[in-house]
Amino acid sequence: NAGVTQTPKFQVLKTGQSMTLQCAQDMNHNSMYWYRQDPGMGLRLIYYSASEGTTDKGEVPNGYNVSRLNKREFSLRLESAAPSQTSVYFCASSDWGTSGSHEQFFGPGTRLTVL
Amino acid sequence: GENVEQHPSTLSVQEGDSAVIKCTYSDSASNYFPWYKQELGKRPQLIIDIRSNVGEKKDQRIAVTLNKTAKHFSLHITETQPEDSAVYFCAASLNNAGNMLTFGGGTRLMVKP
């Protein structure tokens, strides 16, 4: 099993450009999440999807949109990138509601720089 | 919303000593408290978690304690080893399923050989 995978690993954008970060999991998890990690600020939840077909805002949703394409895939879109969105983005998944485990499994991250 | 504060931000110990990291949370309804370890350049990984109906949980050299009245919880690592060097994050959740995790700012632990 690959676990949680993310593409791309690195990306440089110019202000105003758009891009989509891709995330997929092969653990048959119901829930998926997008976080951003900035130095000294820990991880902050952007959006999450408790189950296929649902999405909800997290702590810092402004400037982002998400799509839960199917049970495996959860994408994050930046419509008009801003320098404040320079960060490391982590996708995660968990098996909420079935096995009783609440552990979130993280992907390897995408390092995004907006110039 | 929930607010989680974590102290200290950096911690340096000698190999073999104990390390303690403390977190406080603001919402008394929070009921799930995981700890994640993140090595340099790697993804966060769960090392231990505790639910609000339990006061303490141990897993080999790692233990977590929870004081619901005071709204704080702590990570204890005994007999530290160089491979324990990493950034540790605490988190709290209002939801048993862990959907809305709020993370602390992290503690960089350095274990000197």
Image (cartoon, coloured by chain):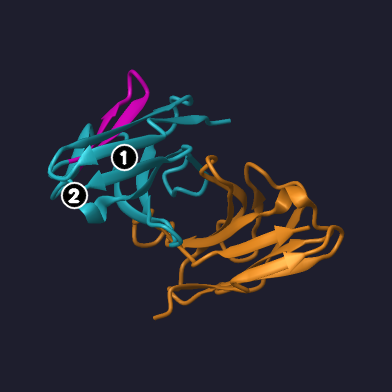
Chain colours: A orange, B cyan
Magenta residue span: B63-77
Instruction: Determine which residue is flagged by label 1.
Output: B51
Amino acid tagged 1: Arg
Q: Is residue B94 above or below residue A32?
A: above
Judged left or right of residue B66, residue B60 is left
Residue drawn where x is 53% and y is 31% of the image: B2
Q: Is residue A35 above or below residue B77?
A: below
Residue most extreme to the top: B70
Q: Position of residue A100 (x, y in %)?
A: 34, 56
Amino acid tagged 2: Pro
Q: Position of residue A46 (x, y in %)?
A: 64, 50
User: Tag 2, which chain?
Assistant: B
Upstream in the sequence, badge 1 or badge 2?
A: 1
Label 1: few (<14), some (14–19) or many (≥20) C-alpha neighbours in 10 Å: some
Judged left or right of residue A105, residue B50 is left
Asked if the residue at tag 2 contacts the one at tag 1, i.e. Cβ–Cβ closer than 8 Å, the answer is no
Label 1: state its secondary structure. Answer: strand
Q: Nearer the viewer, mark 1 or mark 2?
A: 2
* Relative depth, front residue between A103 and B40: B40
Tell me if residue A86 is in the magenta stretch. no
- Do callouts 1 and 2 point to residues on the same chain? yes
Label 2: few (<14), some (14–19) or many (≥20) C-alpha neighbours in 10 Å: few
Residue most extreme to the right: A16
**Is most of the magenta stretch helix, strand or loop?**
strand
Q: Position of residue A109 (x, y in %)?
A: 54, 64
Q: Position of residue A103 (x, y in %)?
A: 38, 56
User: Tag 1, which chain?
Assistant: B
The C terminus of chain A: image quadrant: bottom right
Q: Is residue B109 above or below residue A65?
A: above
Instruction: Determine which residue is flagged by label 2.
Output: B113
